[in-house]
Amino acid sequence: MARFFQPKKKTQLNTKHQSFTIEKLDHHGAGMAYQNKKPVFIEGALPGEQVLAQLTESKSKFSRANLIKIQKTSEQRIKPFCSHYQECGGCNMQHLGLEAQQDYKQQTLSQLMSKFAGQRIALEAPVLSESKAYRRRARISLKFNKKTRQLEFGFRKKQSKDIVTVDHCPVLDNDLDALLTPLHQLLANFSHQDSLGHVELVKGDNTKVIVLRHLKALKEEDQQALEAFAQQHQATLYLMPETDQLNRVVGNSAHYTEAGVTIPFEPNNFIQVNQGVNQSMVEQALNWLSLSENDRVLDLFCGLGNFSLPIAQKVRSVIGVEGVDVMVEKASENAALNQIENARFYQANLEQDFSGQLWAEEKFDKILLDPARAGASGIIEHISQLGASRVVYVSCNPATLARDSQSLLNQGYKLQKLGMLDMFPHTSHLESMALFVKD
């Protein structure tokens, strides 16, 4: 007998306001309640709170809901210090005290490592910095609102493409924050505001950087006004007419000096957002590697040389490997600028087979990894073949750190140290560092 497919009837979402008791925070900072044993994630709610919420999504294994009202307030709840907090999608943890945020992140790191890597050790002291005015770069969204005939200038709203107009950002570096209002006023007088894409603001040790992405050529008077603005504010100005094209029209290239080296960078190069944490992070990594003058060190995902160059000052030789050609060239230039002659840099896709590459034929005493959020799933399986007795893994995603830790443990390494890096205070974003050793 033939059987015909019959689609299941969609159950209608219950959008009535319902009461929930929050039991804990998930790994993204949302409050977790349970309804018929199914987790319900409620952004902005804290453990111990009784809240009124409205379901926005219901799947077979979880639901999501919007917070409507707090009926019983947690003692840990505080008033957010940013006037844009309720709308802006930038920070998501300002309603929780700073120490409680740090405790939450450390608990999250411990839980993920225990659950997925089977490792539970006492955490090292966290790496912390100032919790305000810490961001040395930000992207400002621009949108010409055809209804209001106004240029919107700010950050994306929570879970939306709409823009919150921002005139002050308490977590942005003070020098960059001071540019927000006058820069908005300047751009709001431009012709063809609908062809303005975004603004990037970056703080170097020697200059402030302004990047304007524009989809059409700027009118001569608009560009002259922007150049005058940059000169007035002692800033470097780049124009970006294409995604992969940067034209510096005012000022000098930016650089930062940390851990004893000077690193020039272009505004489209990756640098760590939090200078204070980056400085301490590099120092801690060098300490955990236990470097000696005869060591040969491999720095994987090396970028501009953020770790490679300080390491090179303490060891026999360093090899840095990076997937982006431009970054490899910049790292080599940065080594020459700092008169470092014992560092070499190579380009390689570390997700693919790298056997046969010149650098991979060498043996190393120590290895440092600093991958992107996707982790090091390609290279991680081959770490033991490279000979290192100590491996420091710097992670911006605890889930992939836990996954990659399993591979290192299977290769005979032991987890000796683990610590949280609070690179992004007032957000749920969690960075960490782990040390693995092998006899």
Image (tube, helix red, strand yellow):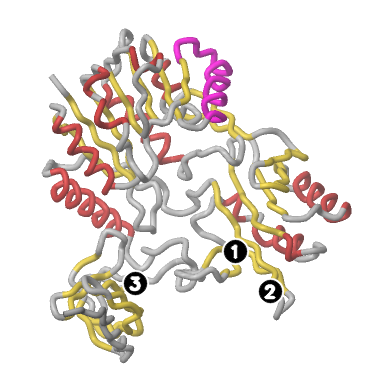
Report the residue that reaches farthest toward the bottom: 16
The amino acid type found where label 1 is placed reads: Gly
The residue singled out by tag 1 in the image is 154
- Whole-Å distance between the Cαs marked 3 and 2? 29 Å
Give the quarter of the image for residue 108.
Answer: bottom left
Kindly identify which numbered label has been placed on residue 193.
Answer: none
Q: Identify which residue, 303 or 14, lies in the foreground.
A: 14
Secondary structure under badge 3?
loop
The residue singled out by tag 3 in the image is 44
The numbered mark, 3 or 2, whose residue comes first in the sequence reads: 3
Q: Identify which residue, 17 or 37, lies in the foreground.
A: 37
At a point 34% along the width and 72% down the height, the residue shown is 44
The numbered mark, 1 or 3, whose residue comes first in the sequence reads: 3
Secondary structure under badge 2?
strand
Kindly identify which numbered label has been placed on residue 145.
Answer: 2
Give the position of the N terminus as an image quadrant: bottom left
Q: State the predominant SS element of the stretch in magenta.
A: helix
Secondary structure under badge 1?
strand
The amino acid type found where label 3 is placed reads: Gly
What residue span does the magenta drawing correspond to?
A: 325-343
45 shown above or below 235:
below
Give the position of the C terminus as an image quadrant: top left
Q: Badge 3, how many Cα within 10 Å: few under 14, some, many 20+?
A: some
Q: Residue 152 in the image: state x and y as whole percent.
A: 65, 69
Q: Left or right: where does residue 336 sit relative to residue 323?
A: right
